[in-house]
Image (tube, coloured by chain):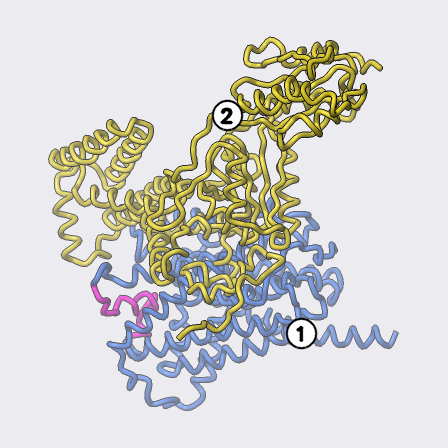
Chain colours: A blue, B yellow
Amino acid sequence: MRDPREFADRISDLQLSLLTAFAVAGGNYLVMPRLVVHTAGRDGWLTLLLAGLFIALAAGSIARLQLKFPGRTAVAYNEALLGAFFGKVLSLWLLLHFLVAASAQLRLVTDSIKFFLLPQTPPEVTMGTMLFVAAYAVRHGINALARLAQVFFPIVFVFLVLIFLLFQTSVDYHNLLPIAAQGWGPLALGTLAALGAYQGYGQMVFTMAFLHRPDQGAGAVWRGLALVAAVYTVTYIIAIAVLGPQHLAGLLYPILDLTRALDFPALLFERAEILMIVVWLLAAYLGLAIAFYLVALGSMQLLHLEKHDPLVYLLLPAFFCIARVPANLTELEQLGRWVLLSFVLLSLTYAVLLPVVAFFLRGRRSRA
Amino acid sequence: MRGPKPPKKPLPLVQAPPRGREEAVPRLGTRLSHNLELLGRYLGGSDDVVFRRFEVAGQPLPGAAIYVDGLVRRDAVDEEILKPVMLELAMARERNGCLAAGEVLACLERRAITVGELRRTSEVEEIVVAVLSGDAAFLVEGTAWALILNTRGWPSRAVEEPITESLVRGPRDGFTETLRTNTALLRRHLRDPHFKIKQFRVGRRSQTDCALAYVEGIVRPEVVEEVRKRLETIDIDHVTETGELEQLIEDSPFSLFPQVQYSERPDKVVAGILQGRVAILVDGTPFVIMAPSVFGHFFTSPEDYYERWLIGSLLRFLRIAGSYVATFLPAIYVALTSYHPGLWPTPLAMAIAATRQGIPFPAVVEALIMEMAFELLREAGARLPRPIGETIGIVGGIIIGDAAVRSRLVSPIMVVIVALTAIASFAIPAYNLAISFRILRFPLTVAAGVLGLYGVVLGFIIINVHMVCLKSFGVVYLSPFVPYRRNDWKDAFFRAPIRALTGRPVMLRPLDRRRQLNRKRGGW
């Protein structure tokens, strides 16, 4: 295995935080309330916080594991830990997971574009253009993505804060009460479901290899996750406060439908949901591009190639085809459940199994 | 002693010497007639080159002065060279008695010639280039040396207010076409002994004088080295403008964005040099370029600093907003009218729909036609003599615009949009960046026509991806915005009070970070 410490590109902790935030929220935010509202109802915000905590624990464990291999990506250290065969299998699974998860999210985004922006444009067009533009950024590597995150972050963040503030005229916080009325059972179930809203934090197994100071990785990922958790929680609270749990449960694109309910001061624009999707496209794009880059980078390392950019246009049709596979929303949701299962298993592998293996390996090595 | 045989082949000045092979450098001999023949090989045949022969100090000692008529100060040649050498020295001959053989030149140099700057050389090519640059060459029988006397002086424009960068408040001097004047203007602003001006020549045929200007101890030596290295790779016959030089040394020649900033204003260039940048001057143009330059530099104007900080900040904010308007306004208008009319407030949507009643084209075609017409107008007016240029504005803007609206070719709102876009693009202080935005407008408008707001967002993303990848001499183009450099934000989106601007921009990594020390203000 080529030693990836040769990576010339480096990113700062702040950039890793933002990459984490975009990788997690970019694809999940638009549908995040739908994941938890059915099980946890009005207490969903609590489950989102709890799930964020669990994910943060897992991220901390992965970051410790990563510290044992500074400058190396998962594809490089899988084989060091599990041996050539199982290591390759795990790497392949990891890449496939990112590929399918990103494709599913691409599908979701293009579906909402069709629904809210361009009802007559075939989704293949939006999908294709989105992928090509993503490929353009991916070819330029991690630095382009990290800086892009820094460009988009203020735009997206300021817009969200603005929306949150504008909602303050139409909220009814009594909708949030009572807390935990159905007991703790639904909350526990909801927390499990809410884990799905944090898919994408796994990009750290690749991006941490680029850090200037690898020991800052855990903190950086935590800050990114904290930002996402905060945005999720506030959004969910506002969604419940504005719409109530019953109404929220019936929505297909909860965030966009929520912003539609916004009493926008009609100064220059009406219909905030179009603005919302336009702004969120930046985040969704970046989430897709990050996953795309990881798949390209991982494949490069798996195939022992020198550069990742020739792979970009080879991988592009794969994303396109997988995103087109689900025939309808039900099938897309089914796919989403498989992805969620794979996500949980992968998280357990990297946060629990591999650290244990590493521990025993080190023990054996020190004895020898 | 005779010098080496003069070359019979074509002149090496205009031929690239074969790489790796050492050429014998042609040198002067001791016989004047031979030397004149040697120089005549290069300089003869041009009627503006003067070979003036004379006898030194009334003795039978022949000498010659060679200069290009028109490039020298005639009175300098007459009064400071010929007159003392031929007459005054003759009168003082008995007292001096120093015209012994072999010492002629030293004696003349010490006692007769009153030109301030002179040097000796025996290399023929150096003499030729010097003469063609406006120096006078002075030769005497019996020595293998020539004196190069700085007599340069040619008709040049006076220092005037720069036309392209006029300010309400600020110094009114601008660079001229003469390199020496320009370096002097810089030196007048900056009496720092660390402020260095290094001259070099570019252009195999033109032998254009260029200069690097920077402050040692502020600028990163790597940056100067990088600039020098890139300049050394240039092998071209002729350079007239820093614009050409810029294109030869910039990082990404295929980018739409300028990566090097230019200015006609000494104050602006001095400010840039003091930030830790390198200025490049070229003889023959008033435009001086500065490197590295980042995106933010193109939005600054010296006036930001001369006016009080709040005004400077607001104006800068206005310019940045203007750049967005200039780039995205037509695209957003097209996207909203063709795809998402619901986004307008209802009364506005009605108004737009009413004015678009009976317009034969879709909004995107209408926008492209109007933008194209506007660009044509601007291009047509740019090079016309001023009185006719104004007519173009009246004919194009008022008559055609009005007629087009009346005949229902375009909607009045479209005219408003195009005019707004144009005004916004004029608000960007850097002309070269404004052109980039003007060009970007067209693909964005097309994208908006095809994919609505989604197309505009994709365009925005592509522009951003391109910009985050750009670098100017090792500095990320979008700094200090991205990557975040909070120290430099004091002078980025807005301009903090002068007292708060205590450091130089960190993004350029200057050796000397400190710009001012905050002392307690005296007085009341």
Residue type, mark 1 in image: Arg
For numbered disc 2, what is the local secondary structure?
loop
Apparent side of residue A353 relative to residue B20 in the rendered image (left or right)? left
Q: Residue at x 71, y 76 (%)?
A: A356
Residue type, mark 2 in image: Trp
Q: Residue at x 39, y 44 (%)?
A: B172
For numbered disc 1, what is the local secondary structure?
helix
Local crowd size for mark 2, using a 10 Å CA cut-off: few (<14), some (14–19), many (≥20) = some
- Taking depth in this image into account, of B379 and B515 the one nearest to the observer is B515
Q: How far across and down, in percent of the image, does residue A245 sit?
A: 31, 79
Quadrant that contains the N terminus of chain B:
top right
Q: Is residue A261 magenta?
A: yes
Q: Which residue is mark 2?
A: B154
Q: CA distance from mark 1 to mark 2?
A: 73 Å
Q: Is residue B265 above or below residue B26?
A: below
- Taking depth in this image into account, of B28 and A222 the one nearest to the observer is B28
Residues shaded magenta:
A247-266
Q: Quadrant of residue A240?
A: bottom left
Q: Is residue A146 above or below residue B401?
A: below
- Taking depth in this image into account, of A19 and B317 the one nearest to the observer is B317
Q: Which residue is mark 1?
A: A64
Q: How far across and down, in percent of the image, does residue B463 sit?
A: 44, 48
